[in-house]
Amino acid sequence: MHDDQLLRYSRHILLDEIGLEGQEKLLAARVLLIGAGGLGSPIALYLAAAGIGHLTICDNDVVDLTNLQRQIAHQSSAIGQNKAASAAHTAHAINPTVHITPLPQRADEAVLARQVAQADLVIDASDNFATRHAVNRACVAQRKPLVSGAAVRFDGQVSVFDLRLESAPCYHCLYPEAGEADEMRCAENGVFAPLVGIIGCTQAAEAIKLIVGCGTSLNGKLLLLNSLDMTWRSVSLKRDPVCTVCSDRAGRMS
């Protein structure tokens, strides 16, 4: 780590739980971020600022005027541009020493299989169940830790599925695909602008903790926020022994 990096990351290095060794882990890490919207914006900016070595941002959507109320990685001049490219540009301006790769395509099975294999950690900041389940399947197959978040109206949630651990539940254990009928979208239901910042920042914090190896992660827990009265609830999660996605993980690990 050269002198400029020591100065840039000095406030992390001063923390005993991170220190020089932890910051070097961040500088060496490869993170895959799915989604560059409301959640993905603060995630991308904070991970870049924290010195994540290589950040890949995947999003095939383009910036729209209605996004600017909450998607802070995009400026008005970015309207019509791809979100992954716009977020990468903003994050790179914050920290030009970080390698950021925009991936302006849909996170389908083939893309995820390739990108998840190259990542140390995956963050799901998408806005639909189909993508969340596809990301989960790829992370289960590759045994990569997954930080998941969602936000709509005034309600948000965050969880960690540390799929390196045999005992960890996966996203499908929490939300089986058969139960997707009540999916809520921001476009139809609205979303409180600061909520996505709170949830996205929490996801970024969990990602950094997992990479550094400090603190206690949200693995096995679902953290729920009602931002209308600013109350948090924590719900314990258990692995579903008959989950159709992760139940045979022990066999694949052997």
Image: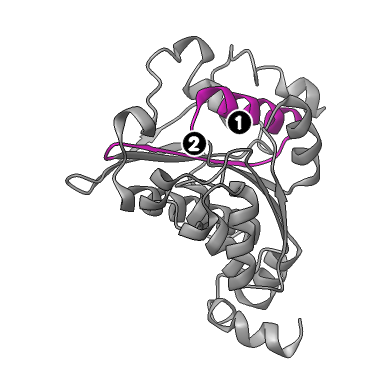
Image coords of residue 72 (percent x, y): 45, 57
Identify the secondary structure beneath mark 1. loop
> What residue lies at 58% left-to-right and 72% top-to-bottom?
94
Q: Residues within 10 Å of mark 1 (few under 14, many from 20)?
A: some
Q: Is residue 109 above or below residue 231?
A: above
| Helix, strand or loop status at disc 2 | loop
- The quadrant of the picture occupied by the C terminus is top right
Q: Amino acid at mark 1?
A: Ser
For the record, the magenta segment spans: 127-154
Which badge, 2 or 1, is on the more N-terminal residue? 1
Report which residue position mark 1 lands on: 167
Check residue 141 in the rendering and tell me which mark sits there, or answer none: none
Nearer to us in this view, 192 or 218: 192
Confirm or deny contact between disc 2 and disc 1 (CB under 8 A). yes
Point out residue 122 in the picture as x, y percentages from the top left corner: 65, 44
**Viewer-nearest of discs 2 and 1:** 2
Magenta stretch contains residue 129: yes
Residue 192 position within the rendered picture, expressed as x and y whole percent measured from the top left: 29, 45
Query: Label 2: few (<14), some or many (≥20) within 10 Å?
Result: some
Rendering quarter of residue 139: top right
Q: Which residue is mark 2?
A: 220
Q: Is residue 187 magenta?
A: no
